[in-house]
């Protein structure tokens, strides 16, 4: 969502010696590498986290992995619980807060007053909620767009809050998050993992179940992302990803400490879901789930910091791989939705039906293939100078002409 520093190898059609006017869309060539690289890479983790949710027919553990899988499946479950589940979502939430500040700052720099900027952010949030509804209606019950829109709609005032307020609210909200995770852990231990709508054979029936699950899950995910969302706002004020070279020491500390915290905190639940630790008590299992959830915030921030360090290292000469990953990040909304389209086509019982036949390891292999497909498509769009269609639609809806007939000066919005 942020439109930050240069992508040196942008498509020729994007290059121009003419600088951006304050109200014009930010050119792809004028974006920062770090946020785009982070989003493009983390879409792989999103794909890995979502793919096994499409499997059905076997009992599952805390994070939805098959309890009867073979050795390879158990390894995959353990690694993903440790490094993927509950780690990618906080990272995207931090980038969401970061990008919201960038959008607000750009509008304010163009001469807009804060009430006008606030209305713009709220309008964009409402459209994200609408996107999320359609996504859940047609494709995936675990949609996150609704959650992003809801959080931004309710907490838009935090963009202007003092640093001290941001950090205090983020810290106190972590306690709320922990309490919610504890309640969810006890529910799983007592009742087992709930059935997912991805197993429904009738397409029409699946729509109703998806919407019902989504309606309950969306607000719960909002609880999960508020803390990293606020920390992303704090980071944007210091331009940590805009200017990673100036903040290398801080980014390195966040990366090292964050990864250590997330690995140590996630290890017990990873061992439980990998069926290595099998004699855990109910209390120990609940605590492992909560610690895994809370320390995932540190992991998400660590991933974002790592992206900043890598972007600084390759800023002068990104190379083909980094450029393609950044292209995917620039079109993250399009690629995120495309993942769901491909997953439904591959896994759903009313399409190819592989969700009832593949194991966790097989689902993860499919996830990698789907992600690579989106990266290649995004790179193709970059080379032809095209933006993502979902990003373009969101921008048109957000910056629609006023009823009076005057068109507001647009600002580039990237998701």
Image: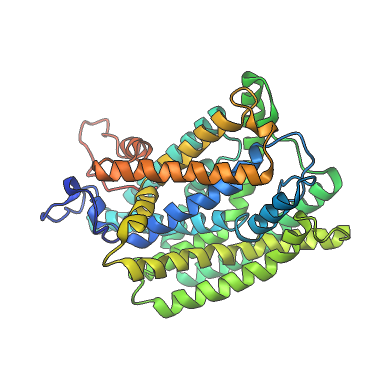
> In the image, 401: left or right of 165?
left
- Above/below status of 380 relative to 249: above
Q: Nearer the viewer, residue 118 or 302?
A: 302
> What colouring does the structure picture have?
rainbow
Q: Position of residue 108 (x, y in %)?
A: 28, 57
Q: Position of residue 176 (x, y in %)?
A: 67, 59
* Quarter of the figure with residue 235: bottom left
Give me the residue at 65% from left, 61% from top: 82
Q: Is residue 266 visible?
A: yes
Q: Is residue 26 visible?
A: no
Q: Residue furthest bottom?
A: 249
Give me the residue at 66% from left, 19% from top: 202
Give me the residue at 78% from left, 38% from top: 58
Q: Residue furthest front?
A: 71
Question: In the rendered picture of this protein, how many numbered marks are placed on residues?
Answer: 0
* Quarter of the figure with residue 52: top right
Q: Residue furthest left?
A: 17
- Above/below status of 130 relative to 158: above
> In the image, 128: left or right of 78?
left
* Quarter of the figure with residue 266: bottom right
Q: Position of residue 39 (x, y in %)?
A: 44, 54
Q: Position of residue 140 (x, y in %)?
A: 57, 35
Q: Nearer the viewer, residue 252 or 158?
A: 252
């Amino acid at each position: 969502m942020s439109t930050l520093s240069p992508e040196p190898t942008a498509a020729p059609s994007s290059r121009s010696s003419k600088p951006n006017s304050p109200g014009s869309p930010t050119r792809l060539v004028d974006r920062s590498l770090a946020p785009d690289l982070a989003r493009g890479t983390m879409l792989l983790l999103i794909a890995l986290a979502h793919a096994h949710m499409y499997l059905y027919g076997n009992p599952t553990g805390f994070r939805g992995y098959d309890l009867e899988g073979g050795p390879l499946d158990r390894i995959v479950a353990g690694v993903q619980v440790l490094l993927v589940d509950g780690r990618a979502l906080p990272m995207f939430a931090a980038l969401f807060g970061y990008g919201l500040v960038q959008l607000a700052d750009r509008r304010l720099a163009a001469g807009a007053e804060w009430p006008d900027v606030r209305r713009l952010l709220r309008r964009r949030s409402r459209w994200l909620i609408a996107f999320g509804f359609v996504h859940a209606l047609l494709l995936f019950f675990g949609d996150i767009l609704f959650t992003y829109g809801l959080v931004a709609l309710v907490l838009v005032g935090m963009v202007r809050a003092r640093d001290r307020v941001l950090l205090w609210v983020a810290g106190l909200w972590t306690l709320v998050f922990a309490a919610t995770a504890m309640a969810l852990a006890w529910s799983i231990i007592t009742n087992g993992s709930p059935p997912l709508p991805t197993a429904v054979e009738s397409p029409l029936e699946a729509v109703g179940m998806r919407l019902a699950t989504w309606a309950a899950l969306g607000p719960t995910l909002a609880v999960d992302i508020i803390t990293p969302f606020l920390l992303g706002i704090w980071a944007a004020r210091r331009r940590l990803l805009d200017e990673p070279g100036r903040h290398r020491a801080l980014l390195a500390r966040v990366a090292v400490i964050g990864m250590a915290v997330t690995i140590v905190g996630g290890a017990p639940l990873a061992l439980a879901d990998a069926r290595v630790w099998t004699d855990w008590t109910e209390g120990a299992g609940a605590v492992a789930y909560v610690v895994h959830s809370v320390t995932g915030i540190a992991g998400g921030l660590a991933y974002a910091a790592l992206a900043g360090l890598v972007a600084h290292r390759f800023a002068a000469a990104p190379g083909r791989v980094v450029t393609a990953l950044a292209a995917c990040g620039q079109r993250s909304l399009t690629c995120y939705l495309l993942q769901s389209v491909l997953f439904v086509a591959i896994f759903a019982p009313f399409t190819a039906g592989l969700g009832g036949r593949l194991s966790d390891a097989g689902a993860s292999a499919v996830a990698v293939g789907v992600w690579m497909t989106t990266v290649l498509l995004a790179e193709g769009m970059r080379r032809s100078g095209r933006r993502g269609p979902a990003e373009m639609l969101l921008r048109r809806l957000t910056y629609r002409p006023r009823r009076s007939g005057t068109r507001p000066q647009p600002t580039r919005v990237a998701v």
